[in-house]
Amino acid sequence: MFCWGDTSKGQLGVLGAAGRVSAPTFVHLFPEPVVSVACGEHHTLFLALSGRVMSCGRNSKGQLGRAKSKDTKFPVIEGLGGVEAVACGQEHSLALCESGQVFSWGGGEEGQLGVISSVAKCTKPELIQIPSPLPIPVVQVACGHFHSLALTKGGEVFAWGQNKYGQLGLGKAITMQATPALVRALTGVPVTRVAAGGAHTLALALPARVFCCGANSAGQLGLKRTDEKGRFSVCAVPALRNMAITSISCGAEHTAVLTKAGEVYTFGDGAHGQLGHNSTDKELLPRKVKGIDAPAKEVTCGSHHTLVLTASGILLAFGRGVKGQMENGCTEDGLQPIKLEGSWNKLAAAKHAEIKISSGWSSNFLFFPPPKTSVLGESIGKLDQAQVQTWLSLSEKDFNLEEAKREICLNFSTSSNLVACFMKDCGASSGRVPGMIQVDLNAASQTFDKLLIVPWIKKAMNIIPLVHNLLYAAPFMRCPEVFLLLPTCPILHEDHNAINLVLPLAVAITNLNESATKTLQEHWCSMEAPMMTKHICMWKQALAFLLKSMVWLNYTPGVNAVLEVLKCLYKANKKAQHQRKVAFSEFYIEEIGNTPLLLQKDVTLWRQINWGLVQEVEGTCVLFCRYPFLLDLQSKINVFNYVADITKVMHQVIHESVRDGGFPQYTLTGETPTPVLQLKLRRTALLEDTFRQLSSTDHYNFRKELLVQFAEDSKLTDVNKRDFFLHAFTELVDPDSRMFIYNDTQTLVWFPAKPNIESKRYFLLGILCGMALYNGTIVHMPFPLAMFKKLVNAKANLEDLMEFSPVLGERLRDLLHDYTNDDAEKMELTFHVSWDGADVELVPQGKEKLVTSANKKEFVNAYVDYILNKSVEKVFEEFQRGFYKVCDRDVVGFFQPEELRGVLVGSEDYDWDTFKKNTVYSGMFHEKHPTIVTFWEVFEELTDKQKKAFLLFLTGCDRVPIQGMVHVRMTVSPLLNSTQDHLPESLTCHSILMLPPYETRLQQETKLAMALNHNRGFWKE
């Protein structure tokens, strides 16, 4: 080997003039090949091919592994064998053995030895206990001046020793760590290499990301800033993100990195030229070293100097030279790369060996290690599909099954390893786009699916320690990719793992810091729809299991965490691009509505807390009403009806209490509040009477039970209520009402920009719509979805305009997406448009502002906003104000806009086959009764219009409930005391068809047609 630099304490193993060797000097120190050299301040460790360790130099703290104070004879350190790697701090040493165990010796006053009994000096190797729930071997060690690092095969980083500047990555609360502690901030980060400087730490992770912490007084962390007190939290180095870094090395206060292309970048302290930029200035950002004419193969830092070895064997040095580290015979600092001369290339060729370099405080070594395969192997890496196939091919009788089990356990036992297994093959130069997922979720899902059908593999894959470790690591984590991978594993979708895996995982996610949470949300937004569905399903299944098992109240913190995660997924799905969105119904959990009395109790507690009647404390029951997106449509309707029913009952109770003298304040006035709202109307002046009575009624009455009495008929029946809403809304949407504008096909209505009637009418219209919803009646109110979006504070967009005005909407969409920039500008459009018979400037001086390729999106947004919002602002505010005089705003907010429209307006999805299958019979009728057989034959020959008329005849409404025709159940019973001359009759409140037992098909066909055409009550044609 070659050595040069400081040898004042014998650390080179050779003597030199004035305590230094000023030029690379060939020496033959050992009878066996050396595979690694590590240098401390004044001591050196040599690792031989046999696994033995020799040492030389100063031994004031026992750093040579023996009691002598100084030794240059290279004796083997006793008690060590099978060593794989060595590392040196200022006055302490580490050795990594083939077993994956780590030994330490030397100075330990700062806890850098990592042994339980902290000592100032240890002269023989002591085993360090690395805390881990599983026996995962260490694969790399590194030393700073007074701190130590260990990287496990699972990609986890442990640190111990001094933490004065945050170099351990354990936070400010710890000043010194005597035993190894997991760096939780790097949990889930697939670390492949660690490096320690004087008091700073860097970690290289897949895919070529670099993380840092510790001293930064000279900018040695590359963060474009200095920190006099150090950086105590681990963070990524943004400036290195796109550089494809392959190795890192740290000096006392500077750092050097090597890229895949062989470029060297340095940053930090440059006082001695150790950055190689022909300057003594510090660099706060990574800067490329010039003067390296060939791709570099290796870079290593001494305390204040740097060595670079190129692929062609050229050796360059720059930095401090007082001890002869630089140019042959020179003791001056080198501010830029200096080529060192020597015969190492010839020797390497003769030995057929590669060249390696190592630097210490002020000493250097160049040596020729023979080929050696590490017993420990690489730290972590992408899961090889060939390895997967090997596992799948094994049976439980194969002799190497135990080794396969260990491999599987290792691959899936740590977050870092799991992330590494499925890291995408994306070049580091591609940069990071917000939301870009760096793990292959589809590959993970497919791999898990293949592996977990094999029983012995499923048993070997123990992910419980991984999940439980996340609970403690979450607040410190920087990279949350593991939370994307775990839901792809079928194990977490199994009911029996809901409590021990899914709930802790949810708690961990809710404990993430703000930065990691934001990153995770970006990832969720960019997930493909099938993967989003898989994530949603895992959380839903866990909740469904707890609900079905009736144990959810025993796990309130975990259940609340799952609900919060689902809320985050729901929000992410709303933000996702259209093609990535999943249907909102994917979030429905039917078990919430199916669990007896759950919703009633939930709604009651939710409202009591909202009203301040109940104090919410730790341990308060889970409130599903805070997560209405999980409720299926029927559950939302049930909640709405339950709240309405409670209010109606409350008015009834007040009425009875006042009547019985329970409320003296009412008794003094002589007024007894009525329990109902009764409208007395003339059929011939329906809207006039309705609006007059509504405008003169106290608003609290709108939430009472509604009764309708017609002047022509003294009876109070539910039929009257249905007839009232049916005909009132028919008149409202008629052009004669002058309340709306209509689309080109006259199928949809919208509010006018310039109303022809007083605004109070729209307030009363809102009340009427609210009353229809409140009383469970479907009405004909053909608004586009935009109106229902506005009611629940959802943003209306171009798609909503396209529903109302397809021609205009298509033109705007084409302008946005199909027209070239030249096309857009040739159209000579301005921000001046016409709508509802009026000219409008979308922006100030809109006539003069041309639509260009640069502002066309602004134009479209302004156009849509004007039509759907600004032009109808006052009218809609009145409508909305009236609507919420009747309906509870919070409960209406449970509905999606599509759901709200469906509940109020119904649908036109007429599934007549389901209608027939759903029909029941009473009395003498049954499915095969001749009258029934004939009825269905006649019914099937009706036109679509006639079938809708029949539905109106049967139910009082010609539209289908939003839940579908399955919710329309007709009962057919004989019409008592009827003859062949009688017409069919109906009880619309109960959907009962009363059918005379007609003897012939002609009779049935004729009488049914007459019934459908017959005027109901006193309504005019």
Image (cartoon, rainbow, N blue to C red):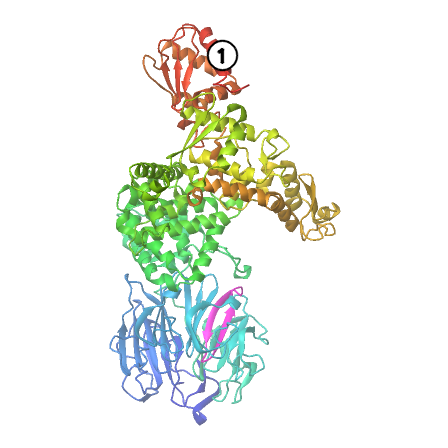
Residue 325 pos. (x, y %): 49, 85
Q: Is residue 221 magenta?
A: no
Majority secondary structure of magenta residues: strand
Local crowd at mark 1 within 10 Å, few (<14), some, or many (≥20)? few
Residue 187 pos. (x, y %): 38, 62
Residue 550 pos. (x, y %): 26, 43
Q: Is residue 969 placed above or below 222 in the rendered structure?
A: above
Secondary element at tag 1: helix
Q: Is residue 156 placed above or below 942 in the rendered structure?
A: below
Amino acid type of disc 1? Met
Query: What span is in magenta?
Result: 241-259
Q: Residue furthest bottom?
A: 18
At x 26%, y 79%, the residue is 118
Mark 1, residue position:
1010
At x 31%, y 68%, the residue is 98
Q: Is 438 in front, or is 363?
A: 438
Q: Is residue 248 magenta?
A: yes
